[in-house]
């Protein structure tokens, strides 16, 4: 998963950069709410709780493409789905007794502040801001993951530069 995820994030960025234009207008859903939950929300939520990077972008694509919501409503739903998957993963890790509370609370606070700021910006500036931000965040996250020494690209760069991996 660690090796392929950066490439998937690059594909997400390319989709948002060059794919069909998002709008704030809802269209007819391609899946029923139940089918959406089973085919999109559950797998993305599972991924989000287990690993996480890019889950918001994956939710956004699924909501716009499959549920038919406009971009602003999709952003709001993305926040709710991220919250639900985070609560579910918290319960699983709590049951297993493997929570690092200080790190978890710091991440929760950051996620809350980021969600509030992002939602406010999306409401103020609309889809014209959402699309480029999704592209930039997906590419930045992909780059960050690829440059990690545990990724083959990062390890190769470290070897070329003579740094220990």
Image (cartoon, rainbow, N blue to C red):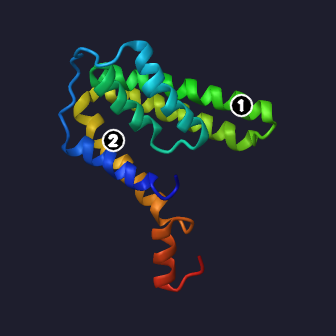
Task: Identify which residue, 55 or 112, lies in the foreground.
Answer: 55
Vertical placement of 34 versus 48: above or below?
above
- Residue 43 on image: x %, y %: 50, 32
- Position of 133 with respect to 155 (left or right) is left
State the image quarter where residue 83 is shown: top right
User: In what element is the residue under mark 1?
Assistant: helix
On the question of residue 123 being in view, the answer is no
Mark sitting on residue 34? none
Q: Cα distance, mark 1 to mark 2?
A: 29 Å
Which residue is painted at 68% across and 31% down in the image?
A: 90
Q: Residues within 10 Å of mark 2 (few under 14, many from 20)?
A: some
The reply to whether the C-beta atoms of the residues labelled 1 and 2 are less than 8 Å apart is no
Question: In the image, which disc is placed on residue 92?
Answer: 1
Please give the name of the residue rendered at 26% of the width and 41% of the height, measured from the top-left corner: 16
- In the rendered structure, which disc, 1 or 2, sits on the residue that comes first in sequence? 1
Residue 34, above or below 71: above
The residue at the point 44 percent across, 26 percent down is 39
* Residue 137 rendering spot, x and y as whole percentages: 38, 47
Q: Nearer the viewer, mark 1 or mark 2?
A: 1
Q: Which residue is mark 2?
A: 134
Q: Quadrant of residue 4?
A: bottom left
């Amino acid at each position: 998963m660690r090796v392929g995820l950066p490439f998937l994030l690059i594909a997400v960025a390319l989709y948002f950069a060059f794919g069909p234009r998002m709008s704030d207008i809802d269209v007819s859903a391609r899946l029923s709410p139940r089918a959406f939950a089973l085919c999109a929300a559950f797998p993305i939520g599972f991924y989000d709780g287990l690993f996480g990077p890019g889950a918001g972008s994956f939710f956004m694509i699924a909501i716009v493409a499959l549920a038919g919501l406009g971009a602003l409503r999709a952003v709001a739903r993305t926040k709710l789905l991220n919250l639900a998957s985070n609560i579910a993963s918290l319960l699983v890790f709590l049951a297993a007794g493997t929570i690092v509370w200080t790190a978890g609370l710091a991440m929760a606070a950051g996620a809350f502040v980021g969600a509030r700021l992002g939602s406010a910006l999306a409401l103020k500036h609309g889809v014209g801001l959402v699309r480029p931000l999704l592209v930039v965040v997906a590419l930045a996250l992909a780059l960050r993951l690829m440059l990690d020494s545990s990724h083959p690209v990062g390890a190769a760069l470290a070897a070329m530069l003579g740094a220990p991996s």
